Amino acid sequence: MSRFDTIVVVDWSARAAPSPANPSKDAIWIGVARDGQVECFYHRTRSAAMDAMGTLFDAELAAGRRVLAGFDFPFAYPRGFAAVVAGQANPLALWAELSTLVEDAGDNANNRFAVALALNRLFPGIGPFWGGPEAETGPELPAKGTERHGHGLPEKRGVELRVPRAQPCWKLFTTGSVGSQALLGMPRLQALRRRYGAALSVAPFEAGDTPIVLAEVFPSLIADVIAELAEPDEINDRAQVRILAGALARLAPEDLTDMLEQGDREEGWILGVGREDDLRAAAMQSDPLDVAGQGLQPPPLRNDCFALPAGVDWTPVDEALGFLQERLAPVVARGAVPVAEAGGRVLAEDLAARRANPPHPNTAVDGWGFDGANIGAGPQTLTAVDGRAAAGRPYGGVVPPGSAVRVLTGADLPQGVDTVVLDEDVALGGGEIAFHGPLRRGANTRRAGEDVAAGALALMAGRVLTPADLALAAAVGHGHIPVFNPLRVAVISTGDELVEAGDVAGPGQIYDANRPMLLRLAARWGYLPVDMGRVGDDRDALRATLSRAAGSADVILTSGGASAGDEDHVSALLSEAGALQHWRIALKPGRPLALGLWDGVPVFGLPGNPVAAMVCALVFARPAMGILSGAGWCEPQGFDLPAAFAKRKKPGRREYLRARVRDGRVEVFASEGSGRISGLSWAEGLVELGDDAQEITPGDPVRYIPFGSFGL
Ligand code: AMP
Ligand code: MG
C-alpha cells in the first residue's frame, strides 16, 4: 500500500451554535501535516469544517496525493446497536441510517437530542442514550446515566475498555459529550463517503487501499506527550491535532498500515491503541519537517532579483550590497538531521526548549542535602537518613525536617531538600552530620530551568550550528534538528589561456589559480563545493557547463569573462538568457561583476584576476550566499588600527588593500596589482578604504577586516 502524503486530524465539536470568532477551545480544530509541515485550522461550525475538508480532499486527489483523515469521535457503537437501528451489524449502514435522522444546520443548530430519544425507543427498557439540557430530557431520554435500565447494550466498545480515558458514546451531555459528537459526526462522514465514492474507505471496516482513508483517532492516547510538546499558552485542542497529525505523519508507513488494519468490523477501533509507544516516539521526534524524507522546497528566485536601477553608471558598494540583501532568499530545501550530525548546518527554525535545563533542581556538589529553612548561625546537627541521591538515581523518599541525605553532584534534590552543604564542611558520626551555619537557603544547588526555562527560545533560525549549540539543543530535549540542506556551490573557470594546475603549460598559457581558491572558499563557508572544471572561451561549451552546473548546484561561481568584451562569454550568455545584470561596481579591485540567473540558479560572474575574484567573492558572493543558504546576511566585522603605510586615494570608489597587522599597525602589500597572487597569500586581511578621497599617512586609523571576519 502506498504511503500517505497528507495526514489530517480533526478535533470534532458538538456545539449547538457557532464557536467564537477568535480561535478558542472546545471548537473544531484541524491539524494538517503535509510536505513536512503541520498547519492548524480553526472552524466555527461543522459545516465550515467539512467545506474546508472537501476543498483539501479535492486538491489532494487532483494532485494524486493520498490522505489519511482522523476524527476524534467514535465511528461505531457497542455490539448490537447497528443491527437494531440499521438492520445489519454494519456501522456504515448505521451511518447511512443516521444521515436520514440527523439535522445539522450551517449554524450548528441540530436535533441530536430528538434523534437520541427516537433511537432509545427502538430498544427495550430505558436508554441507552442519556443526558441533555432539562428541556430535552425526560422518561425516555433520562438526565442521568443511572436512570437507564434494560436496554440490553454494553456500556462500552471493546476498544474503549482498553482506553481508560474514553467516554462512553451513550453520554450526550457535559464533559466529552462523546455521544453527541458521534451522532453529529457520523452523518458528516457519510456525506464524505457519498461524495468520494470508491476513492474513500473507512478503517477498519473497509479495505483501505484508497486515496482517502478515514479513521477514528483519540489524541488523549498520547496526552502525556501532548502536554509536554504543547507550546506555552497553546489551546489544548490545537496542540492535540497538531501533535497527533505530526506523529502520524512521522510513523513508518508500514507501522501506520498495520495500525489501520487493526480492529473490529462491528465496533471499530481507535487508531494506534496498543501502539501508543510508537505514537509517542513519533510525536517526540523533534522535526516536523522530514516527513516525506525530501524536505520543503523554497520558492524560486525572481528573475529580476539582480536588476539594478536603470541609468546608474557606477553603483556604490553599499548600494549593491543592499540590493542583494533585499532581493535574495534561501534557495535550499529543509530537512531534519539527528542532533549529532547537525554541526555546521544552518538551523532552519527557531528552536524552543522542550524541557528546562536543568530539568529538575539538583545538587552542584557532593555533600548533604536538607531543608535549609531552619539553619541558623553556629553549630548545626542533623540526622543522617539512610540511602543517597546520585545523578540518574534519585532518592525516592521524603527527607523530614531535621534530617539530611547524602547527595552526589547532579542528583535531583529529593523531596524535603532545598539546600546542600559541601562534604568537606561536614563531620559525620553516630548517625548524624554536623557543620557550621549559617548556610544560605538553596546553597550549592541548581534551580530547575536556571539555565534555560522550558519553552524559552534556545537557538535562533539561521544559526550555523556550533558544537556548543548541539550541546544546548540536546540538553533541552531535541533529538532531531530542522536544518537547511547545505548550499551546493558550483565553481567554473573560464578562459582559453587556462590549464590545470600541474599540467604542462604551453605558450601563452597560465595555470587555473581561481578554481582551487573558490572551491576552498565555498568549503570554508560550510557549503558543498561542486567542481565544474575549466571551460575555454567557447560559448557553446560554456552554455553546456552552466546548464550542468545549474542542474547540480544551488549557486554558480564563475571567474573570468565577466566584462563586456569579445571574449567575455559569461556576460554574453547571461545576457542572451535575458537574465544578465552587469554590475559596474565602484570597487577596486573588482569592477566587472556579472550577476544573473541560469535556469533559475543564481550565477556570480566574478572577475578573472585572482585578487579581484577573491575580493569580490568575500565582499559580494559571501553575504549573498549567506542568504541563499538560509543563514542570512553577514557583515564582516572590522576595526580601526593605525596605518603603517601612506596612500593617496581618489574619490568615487571603495578600495580593498591586501593587509596584515604587525606590532599593532596595519601593513599593506607593496603592490596593488590585481594579478599579484603572492600578495593575497601574504595578506591576513583587507584594509577597507571608504568611497571618498583619502590621504592616509602612517599612524592614521584605517579599517582592518581580518580574513577571519570573512569566515576564513
Ligand atoms: P578576464 O576577466 O577573463 O578578462 O580575465 C582577467 C585576467 O585574469 C586575465 O589576465 C586572465 O588570464 C586572468 N584569469 C582569468 N581566469 C583566471 C584563473 N582561473 N586563474 C588565474 N588567472 C585567471
Ligand atoms: Mg578571460
Image (tube, rainbow, N blue to C red):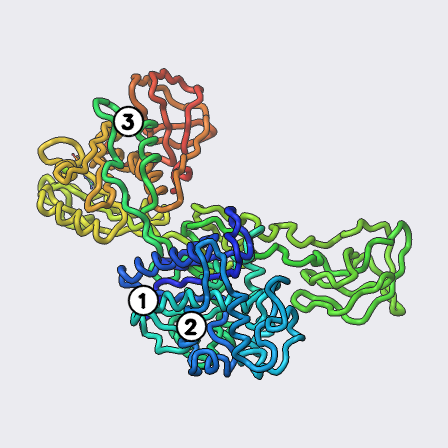
Find residue 655 and report its horizontal and vertical position in percent: 32, 25
Nearer the observer: mark 1 or 2; the answer is: 2
Q: From the viewer's perspective, tell me whether residue 383 is left or right of residue 225.
A: right
64 left or right, relative to 433: left
Q: Which residue is mark 1?
A: 196
Badge 1 amino acid: Tyr
- Left or right: where does residue 656 sit relative to residue 15? left
Kindly identify the residue that appears in the image at 42 percent across and 65 percent down.
188
> Which quadrant is home to the N terminus?
bottom left
Q: Secondary structure at mark 2?
A: helix
Asked if the residue under mark 2 is in contact with the one under mark 1, i.e. CB atoms within 8 Å, the reply is: no
Q: Nearer the viewer, mark 1 or mark 3?
A: 1
Question: Is residue 36 positioned above or below 619 on the image?
Answer: below
Q: Secondary structure at mark 3?
A: strand
Residue 708 on image: x %, y %: 41, 39
Could you say which quadrant of the image residue 583 lies in? top left
Mark 1: secondary structure:
helix
- The image position of residue 242, as x and y in percent, is 48, 58
Residue at x 49% of width, y 57% of height? 109
The answer to whether one can see residue 617 in this image is yes
Task: Note whether ligand 1 is within 8 Å of mark 1.
Answer: no
Cα–Cα gap, marks 1 and 2: 15 Å
The residue identified by callout 2 is 95
Mark 1 or 2, nearer chain start: 2
Q: Residue visible at 20% across and 36% down?
A: 608
- Number of marks: 3
Pointer 3: what residue? 587
Question: Amino acid type of disc 3?
Answer: Leu
Amino acid of disc 2: Trp
Of the residues under marks 1 and 3, which one precedes in the sequence? 1
